Amino acid sequence: MTPMSSATDPVAVHPHHEPPHPYPPAPHSPTPYPAAPYPPTPYPAAPYPAARYEEPQQDRVTRFIQRKWRDSPFWVAPAAMLVCMAGAVGYTLATHPTEANAGAAPTCLLKYTTGFVCPGCGGTRAAWYLLHGDVPAAARHHALFVFVVPFLLYMYVAWAGRRLFGWKVPQLTLSPGVIGLFIAAWGVFSVLRNLPWAPFTAFYV
């Protein structure tokens, strides 16, 4: 067998070469191909602007009150509330509501015209009895008022003590659920005290 020479060997005459790739690998690149020569196409913008929340504008009275609240000394608010409570106590002691008749001024227009007691009827007399230490009589005229008074006094003392003297007294906060429950109980109490049957007649004032 005669060996083939390079002149007659087709592989030797026409060696097989891989065609060069049009994108040679970039040096120190994890991919064998370079990045695209054009930036990516961004997404089109929304045809309408994004909605923005605008805070509601406060009225003139609210702005005036808030400005006076910020500019007033820290002792003004507790002192003003104390003056209001002292005025209510003085009015109750001076008018003797337990001795007034049904037509004496000031009177409840609902009771005077219809005979039904309103949700606040008996509150002044209950306060008068509380100021004189007669808790059963006060509860008989307005039980919910007697129930609420200790909580209101504690809330004022805790708030005023922290604001004026820096007392570390736990604050009593009322959640919306508690307030709603109290209003519902007040409404039921107002209806029951107008019923003409015992034992509800005991709460008619």
Image (spheres, rainbow, N blue to C red):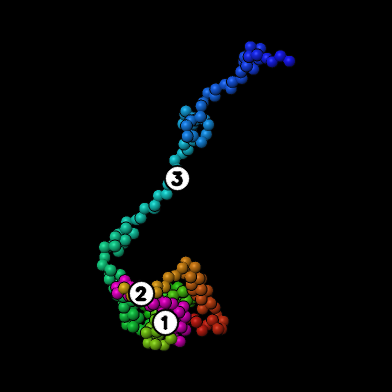
Crowd rating for badge 3 (residues with CA inside 10 Å; few <14, some 14–19, many 20+): few
Disc sitting over residue 126 in the figure: 1
Q: Residue at x 47, y 76 (%)?
A: 117
What amino acid is at disc 3? Answer: Ala
**Residue 126 in the image: x percent, y percent?**
42, 82
Element type where label 1 sits in the image? helix
C-alpha separation, residue under disc 3 versus residue under disc 1: 55 Å
**Residue 105 in the image: x percent, y percent?**
36, 77
Q: Is residue 7 left or right of residue 180?
A: right
Disc sitting over residue 51 in the figure: 3
Mark 3 touches mark 2? (CB < 8 Å): no
Element type where label 2 sits in the image? loop
What amino acid is at disc 1? Answer: Ala
Q: Residue at x 53, y 77 (%)?
A: 192
Direction right: furthest residue: 1
Disc sitting over residue 168 in the figure: 2
Query: Front-most of 149 and 108?
Result: 149
**Residue 74 in the image: x percent, y percent?**
28, 68
Q: Residue at x 45, y 73 (%)?
A: 110
What amino acid is at disc 2? Answer: Lys
**Residue 185 in the image: x percent, y percent?**
51, 73
Q: Which residues are magenta?
A: 136-165
C-alpha separation, residue under disc 3 versus residue under disc 2: 44 Å
Element type where label 3 sits in the image? loop
Instruction: Quarter of the image for the N terminus: give it.
Output: top right
Q: Is residue 180 left or right of residue 89?
A: right
**Does 149 lie within the magenta span?**
yes
Query: Front-most of 10 and 136?
Result: 10
C-alpha separation, residue under disc 2 versus residue under disc 1: 32 Å
Between label 3 and label 1, give the one nearer the viewer. Answer: 3
Q: Is residue 149 left or right of residue 22?
A: left
